[in-house]
Amino acid sequence: MTLEEVMSDRDSDDEVDGEDADLADRHRIDALEDVSPTEKNFMHLWNSFVKKQRVFTDGHVPWACEAISKFHKKEFIESKPLHS
């Protein structure tokens, strides 16, 4: 830590570690029994994306759909089950 970080009033104890949140999300999704592995992977990609991009309102969803499709374009094209 820098001296400025040590001396500041900012407390980082309340911050959520993105990797821990992603892991917890993955465990919750993997526990679903009636969902295919492809659907689980897509759900995890979506949840991770909206957390990182701070999609909070329904008005942001159209933008988020377009953005995630561009960001994960290669994965979506290569996934045969997503085409059906």
Image (tube, rainbow, N blue to C red):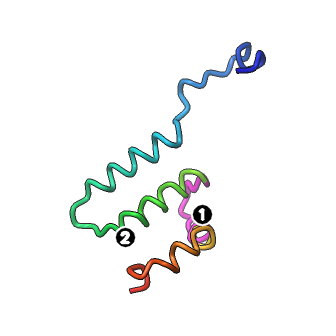
Q: Say above or below: 56 vs 77.
A: above
The tally of labels here is 2
Give the labeled residue for mark 2: 38
For badge 1, the amino acid type reads His
Q: Quadrant of the C terminus?
A: bottom left
Say whether residue 39 is left or right of residue 63: left
- Give the number of the disc on residue 70: none
Give the labeled residue for mark 1: 60
Crowding around mark 2 (Cα neighbors within 10 Å: few <14, some 14 to 19, many 20+) is: few
Q: Say above or below: 74 vs 42.
A: below
Q: What element carries label 1?
A: helix
Of callouts 1 and 2, which one flags the residue occurring earlier in the amino acid sequence? 2
Q: Position of residue 60 (x, y in %)?
A: 60, 63
Q: Position of residue 36 (x, y in %)?
A: 29, 69
Q: What element carries label 2?
A: helix
Q: Where is residue 75 in the image (x, y as percent from the top left)?
A: 52, 72
Residue 63 within the segment the image draws in magenta: yes
- What's the residue at 32%, 50% (across, down)? 28
Q: Say above or below: 77 vs 55.
A: below
Say whether residue 44 is left or right of residue 67: left
Q: In which image quadrant can residue 81 be found?
A: bottom left
**Which region of the structure is painted magenta?**
53-65
Crowding around mark 1 (Cα neighbors within 10 Å: few <14, some 14 to 19, many 20+) is: few
Foreground residue among 27 and 13: 27
- What's the residue at 53%, 42% (across, down)? 18
Disc 1 and disc 2: Cα gap in Å?
A: 25 Å
